[in-house]
Amino acid sequence: MKTLTFNKICLLAFLLRACLLVYGEFQDAYMTVKYTDIDYVVFTDAARFITQGQSPYARETYRYTPLLAILLTPNIYLFRSFGKCLFVAADLIVGYLIHCILLLRGMPSKRALFFDALWLLNPIVANISTRGNAESLLGCMVLGTLYLMLQKRTHFYGACALFGLSVHFKIYPVIYAIPLLVLLDEHDTVPLPRIMQEYQVIRYRCMYALRQMPNPLFTFLHHLLSFLSPIRILFAITSAGTFFILTGLMYQR
C-alpha cells in the first residue's frame, strides 16, 4: 500500500474490469455457461421494447423502473455491452465516492486508500458489474446522496432529489432515510423557504411552552418537535416529492 496512490488504484480497478468485460464476451461467444447475468438479457429486451415505442413490461420478468430500460436503449442503438460499461463506470464512481466521503469524515488519505482498495480491487465487486448487474447504479445514488449531504450547505436539495431517485429505482434504499435524517443537524445553515421560517418560529414557541409542563406526554411532544426541524421536513418533502413524481411519470410507460 505504501507505493499505491488513489489514481493507481483507480487505474488497476479499470484494467481489472476491462479484462473481465473482454473475457465475458469470449465466454458468452464460445462457452455453454454464459458470463452475462440473465437479468442483463432482460434489461436489454426491455430496452428493445422502449425503442419500439412499447412498454418495457412487455418483456416478461422485467420488474424494474422504466428508467433502467431507457438508460440501456444504447444497447440496441450502439452496442449490446453498453449497459455493462455504464455499470462499470458507476462501480468506479462508487470507489471515488468512498474515497471522498472518508476524507470528508476526517480520515487520512493514506488510510482511506485501504478502504478504497477493498471496493475497487475486489474481484467479486468487479465481477458483479461486468456481468451486467445494475446494483452499482444504486450504490452510486446512495453514496452520492451521502456525499452531497455532507456538503449540505450547497448541495442539500441535490441530495434530497438523488435520494428520491434511488428509492424510485429500487425501494430498499428507503431504509437509509432515518440515518440521513439523523445526520441533519438543527444548526445546519441551509436556505429555508419562507413557510419553513414561519414554521421554525411556531416550533420554537411550542417547544418553549412544552418545556414548562413537566408531564411525560408533553416531554415526548417536546422531543418530537425537537426532531422535526425544518431541514428534516424539507428533506422528507423534497425526496418524497421526487419519488412520487418519477413514479407517476414512469407509471405512464
Image: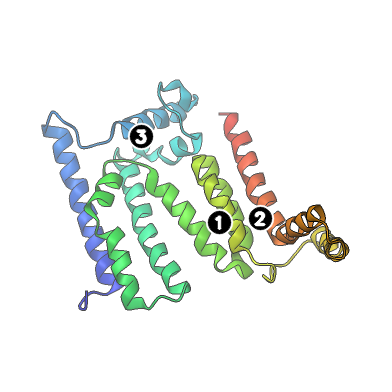
Q: The residue under label 2 is which amino acid type?
A: Phe
Q: The residue under label 3 is which amino acid type?
A: Ile
Left or right? Give the position of 196 relative to 111. Answer: right
In the rendered structure, which disc, 1 or 3, sits on the residue that comes first in sequence? 3
Q: The residue under label 1 is which amino acid type?
A: Pro
Mark 1 vs mark 3, CA separation in Å: 40 Å
Q: Give the residue drawn at x 20%, y 37%.
A: 35
Element under disc 2: helix
- Is 165 or 70 nearer to us in this picture? 165
Element under disc 3: helix
Location of mark 2 (residue) = 235
Q: Residues within 10 Å of mark 2 (few under 14, many from 20)?
A: many
Location of mark 3 (residue) = 76
State if disc 2 and disc 3 touch (CB < 8 Å). no
Q: Residues within 10 Å of mark 1 (few under 14, many from 20)?
A: few
Image quarter where the C terminus lies is top right
The percent coordinates of residue 142 (x first, y second) are 48, 53
Hey, which quadrant is residue 157 in on the image?
bottom right
Q: Give the residue drawn at x 61%, y 57%.
A: 181
Given this view, does label 1 or label 2 mark the residue nearer the observer?
1
Mark 1 vs mark 2, CA separation in Å: 12 Å
The percent coordinates of residue 41 (x first, y second) are 32, 31
In the rendered structure, which disc, 1 or 2, sits on the residue that comes first in sequence? 1
Location of mark 1 (residue) = 179
Q: Give the residue drawn at x 74%, y 55%.
A: 224
Q: Give the residue drawn at x 18%, y 34%.
A: 28
